[in-house]
Image (cartoon, coloured by chain):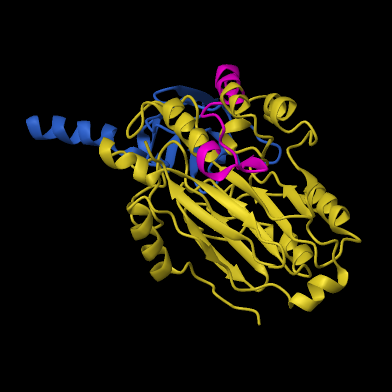
Chain colours: A blue, B yellow
Amino acid sequence: MRAILLAAFCLFALPAFAEDVTIDNFTFTPAEITVKAGATVTWTNRDDIPHTVTSAAHPPIFRSPALDTNETTSVTFNTPGVYRYFCSLHAHMQGTVIVQ
Amino acid sequence: MAQQNDTPNAGRRAALECMLWAGSGVLWTMVGGIPRSSVLAATPEPTDDFSFAQISDSHLGFSAAPNTDVTGTFQLALAQVQHHAKPALMIHTGDVSHLSRAAQFDTAWQLVSTTGIETHYVPGEHDVLDNDGADFFARFTKGGPKGWYSFDQQGVHFIGLNNVQNLQAGGLGNLGDAQLAWLKQDLEGRAASQPIVVFAHIPLWTVSETWGWGTADSEQALALLRRFGSVTVLNGHIHQVMQKVEGHVAFHTARSTAFPQPAPGTAPSPGPMKSVPAEKLRSMLGVRQVTLVRGQSDLAVVDSVLEG
């Protein structure tokens, strides 16, 4: 029973199911997450440098203000699809939200 | 006579760092430029030797390791510029503020004003976080409502560029078509012998693609500049001194007055070097003096670390 509980916990801890993304060392972690339609994803900036969460679509579908240290931003994804995003200040920082 | 050098000169840089460590500063002159006779033939000769200062990446409002007093180190930098260099003008290559806040802009403006030195700014990405940079442009780049402009000083043509906006996912810094068209027009009809100084925040050569330390369309700008015999490109953004010479074009990045960043590939991210001890911090911050010597096509660049 204990083993099963542990297994269940691990399943929820898998990055693919997380709905929180952290920004550390100029990196979105996890860089790719999969959520169900209607889910809200929250990004938290743990760097001492501001970052943004900006849709890579033209025009952008979502665009956060600059997040200072420990500030958060959230986006609710209602429509299934693949949503690529980046930091508009440090464009090499990229991530993906897959909505099922 | 063109010298090709595609990588930063690590040996010379090491020597520079070593000498700067002793607080001495060092003067060196770049190889490149057109023959002296061409300079004489076509140019309105610069009227006099003159020097200007470059400061960069003051990040006013930053307050974390390794520097919780960026205002203090900015003041030290300005004092150093005033005391040692006596420049004709000063350029600030961006990231004046850390978060584009009005109070951060105010502090910068007031402290720079106390020096009495005419100062020209270009934006860093930290300066244009709100209103697409309108607040910064209204205050710091009055001659350039989008952050780019040019002016002449004693025969030298200065060009301030904005390469920190409208970045593309996965890409580098960006100038954009409108700015490139303006640059083309700005350079049209100018004598190839007129010394050119270009200043912009993000390097106009690719220092590190992985960290986004370069400008995606810089080649288009450089193509317009190559016919000139003396082009000096001054950048910030990477908080460390690097240089490269490519034909008649010399590239230099400057130290920050706030905090150092790691050399590419030496750390997991380009963020502040948090573990720098307090007693070592000032030796990793600094200012730059650039001197045009009458009759020489190459500008002399002196980087010095903060004292005091």
What residue is rendered at 36% in x and 26% in y? B68
Q: Which of the 4 image quadrants contains residue A19?
A: top left
Residue B95 in magenta stretch: yes
Front one among B56 and A13: B56
Left or right? Give the position of B274 relative to A52. Answer: left
B51 in relation to B209, above or below: above
Left or right? Give the position of A70 relative to B158. Answer: left
What residue is rendered at 39% in x and 40% in y? B307
Residue at the extreme top: B103
Residue A27 pos. (x, y %):
41, 43
Residue B101 in view: yes
Residue B175 pos. (x, y %):
71, 49
Front one among B236 and B1: B1
Task: Name the quarter where the N terminus of chain B is drawn.
Answer: bottom right
B68 in relation to B188, above or below: above
What residue is rendered at 88% in x and 54% in y? B185
Task: Name the quarter where the C terminus of chain B is drawn.
Answer: top left
Residue A20 pos. (x, y %):
39, 29
B47 in relation to B32, above or below: above
Left or right? Give the position of B242 relative to B192. Answer: left
Residue B83 pos. (x, y %):
51, 38
Left or right? Give the position of A82 relative to A12. Answer: right
Residue B77 in magenta stretch: no
Front one among A58 and B281: B281
- Highlighted range, magenta: B82-109
